[in-house]
Structure formats: structure tokens, C-alpha cells
Image: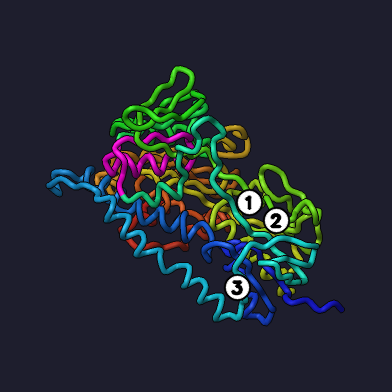
Amino acid sequence: MTAYDYDVLYIGSGHGTFDGAIPLAAKGKKVAVVEQDLIGGTCPNRGCNAKIVLDSPVALKRHLEEVHGIVTGDVAINWSENQAHKHEVIAGLPDFIQGLLDSSNVDILFGRGTLVDNHTVKVNGEEKTAENIVLSTGLRPNRLNIPGDDLAHDSEEFMNLSEMPKRVTIIGAGYIAMEFATMAQAAGSEVTVILHGDKALRAYNQPYVELVIKDLTSKGVKFIREVEVEAIVGGANGLVVRGSELNIDTDWVLDATGRIPNVEDLGLEEVGVKFNEKGIEVDDHLRTSVSNIYASGDVIDKVQPKLTPTAIFESTYLMHIFAGETTEAIQYPVIPSVVFTSPRIAKAGVTVAEAQANPDKYTIVENDLAGDWYRQVEKEQIGHNTLIFDADHKLVGATEVSNKAEDVINALLPAIEFKFGPAELERMVYLFPSIASQAWGQL
């Protein structure tokens, strides 16, 4: 039997790695993690954690606007202080995660990992071998390929702005574009959002998306649809974003045109690992085209949402595989998702579009929540949800737009995942009054 340096070697240290690597090492397996940047990957360092810290005063400001008169006085966001607070919260996360890895006896190999063969990875010129290898290299921001693209910035640069520019132009209409448009406007910037097509947040219920756009528009955000950006140039007073019938003066440009998988310079072609523009191809056991090389997290080409919870589930699944605790194919649970605009949009399970396309299978129940007594406690101005039931009246999907949409979907998630019927629903007793009790009362 061949003796390898490690039982499992991971390339990348994000949630697609450490959530499984730590318990795997605790079970006695010899594990290594290769990382060329910050331990923890995108989410803790330049993604979810940073974003939610910066958004916290934005959500508070929105709430204070809704209860204006009950709470008096003007409120403004000090962006530089907000930025400083973000650094206070997340600065220690890489060391914290590294401490968890160290305490579990996971070897951390700093440097770029490149596949030499199906059992060997080169790191800083030194070769390490492993019985199994996991590719968990994640995504990075896409960059426009136009004249002046070097004048645009990415999401990480936005989240590191020490001062909010007076005029911000955002190219794109996905999560990052809509969330950062919300932040920039709340922080006092004049915001323009440029859409390549006619829809934003395509994966979400479009009437709810349009409610968010309408609300942002009422606050001064400009949305320009179906426009092709052709160039970014320096102007007499900042920058100019140009396109067909487009000439926008601005101070700062955010390129929010999506994220692409980190598959380059890993030795994938040389070893025979198949991939495409959407990521690394895997089977129902997360195996690549090379049987002992697996992939986890956002770098995978998959239909499931490329989100932190998905990566955690995949990493944990692989831990059970490598520990010999299962040989079953991965069975994904219901994976919720949320856009942290103000109000939020969140969803889980069967979508409204899918239900509408299959009226014989699903019943759609729409609820206007703004008049609900509990929503009026905080004087919410926008609140709607759509619940999807199957033929047995079991909840199979939900989507909501409101200030607490993420909390509502989290409360409903067990019913969707475990297919609760009337008997199980009666057994669920939530604290009252609470948003969860109000959501459950609609079932």
C-alpha cells in the first residue's frame, strides 16, 4: 500500500474546506490545507462577514426612517467609522480559523498549490502527496473587457472604501450590485445602476425585485436598463462611463458583472480534471473526472446556489466520505438564499416561477404583510410573501420581501426541508410575539 504524506489535502481554506477538514482531522485522519492568501477564504475576509457588518447601520438607518416622528432627529452613516468597525469585527477571523485548524492538527501549507499528478501537489517548489485531494479554490470577481476596465473596482475594493465617493456607478444587477447600491445610497452617495438586460436579481421573484428597485428609485438611485457599457474614461471631473446612448459622469465605478471560478494554473488540464466556464465538473459524490480528486464549494459547476451554506454542506459531506462513514451520493437539502437589500428578499424551496409553471402540482398563496399588526410595530412599509404548497398542503417553497425576510425564511425552513404536515405544524410552538410566530401562523 502506498504511503502518502496525507490522507486528504485541500487546496483552498474557505468554508468548502475548513468546516470538513477540522472534524476530519479530529477523527484521526492526517489532513493538510494549502492557502496562498488569508485563511478562511472569501466569506470571512472579503465577503459575507464584511458585508453584513457594513450593512448593519444601513438597515438601522432604514428602520429609523420608517419610524421617523416616533424617533426624532437626523441620522447619517459615518462610512469611515463603519469601515473601522468592520475591520474590528473581521480582522481576527483568519487567526481564529487557523487556530481551529492548528488545534485539530491540520497542517497549513502557505503558498500556491498546483497539481503534479493525481496524488501530488506542489507548494513553493516542494511536493506533497495525498490519498485524496479536494479542490476548493472558490470564485473571484469577473472583470469587464472594455477600454478603461482598469478604472473600475471590484467588490473587495468597495468593502474597503475608507470614504464613500459622492457619485458611484455600478455595472451589473446581481447580489453585489443591488446590495452595494443600497449601502452606497444610505451612506449618501449618488448611485447609478446599469443593467445589461431588463431584469435584476433574475433568480428571485421579479415582482418583489421590482418593489426593491422602486424603493431604491424613490430614494434617488437611478436604474438604467438594457445598456451595453463600452468604455470607462477619465473626465475633467472624475470618470465617464460610456456606451450606446450612455454618458455618465461619476467618481467611482463598481464592476459587479458576476464572479468566475478559480481554475487557472492549478494543473487541472495536465492531470485531466475536467472543467468549464462555470467551474469544475463533479459527479454525485463530488468526485472530479479523476477519481481521487474531489471539489467543494463555489468552484464547482452545479445547479445549487454558490453560497456559503452550500459549501459548508459539501465540505461536511466529504468529511463523512473520507472518514468512511458513508458511501451514499450527496443529497442536497433545501438551500435558502437572501439578498441583503433594504428590504431584504429571501427564498427557499420551490420558486414562484416553478409553481406558476406547474399549477397542477402546486398551490400559490400570496400574503400582503405590510398591514400585519406585528409588521406595524416597526412600521414596515414593504412586506409581501408567497407560500407554495403541494397537493397534500405541505409547504414546499417560500419567498418574501420585507425587512426581516431572512428570519422568516429561516423559521419556515424546517417545514420545507422535512415536509411537515398538519400534525407536525401543530407541534411547532414559537416564542410570541416574534417574527417566527407570525410567519408560522400563515401556514
Quarter of image, res 295: bottom right
C-alpha gap between disc 2 and disc 3: 18 Å
First in residue order: circle 3 vs circle 1: 3
Q: Nearer the viewer, residue 185 or 380?
A: 185
Q: Can residue 13 be seen here?
A: yes
Q: Is residue 361 left or right of residue 434?
A: right
Q: Are marks 2 and 1 in contact (CB under 8 Å)?
A: yes
Q: Can residue 364 be seen here?
A: no
What amino acid is labelled 3 in the image? Ile
Residue pointed to by mark 2:
266
The disc placed on residue 262 is 1
Which residue: 75% across, 54% down? 268
Q: Are marks 2 and 3 in contact (CB under 8 Å)?
A: no
Q: Secondary structure at mark 2?
A: loop
The disc placed on residue 108 is 3
Image: magenta residue range: 163-189
Residue 330 location, x and y as percent? 70, 59
- The quadrant of the image that shows the N terminus is bottom right
Mark 2 is surrounded, within 10 Å at the Cα level, by few (under 14), some (14 to 19) or many (20 or more) other residues, namely: many
The disc placed on residue 158 is none
Residue 128 is inside the magenta segment = no
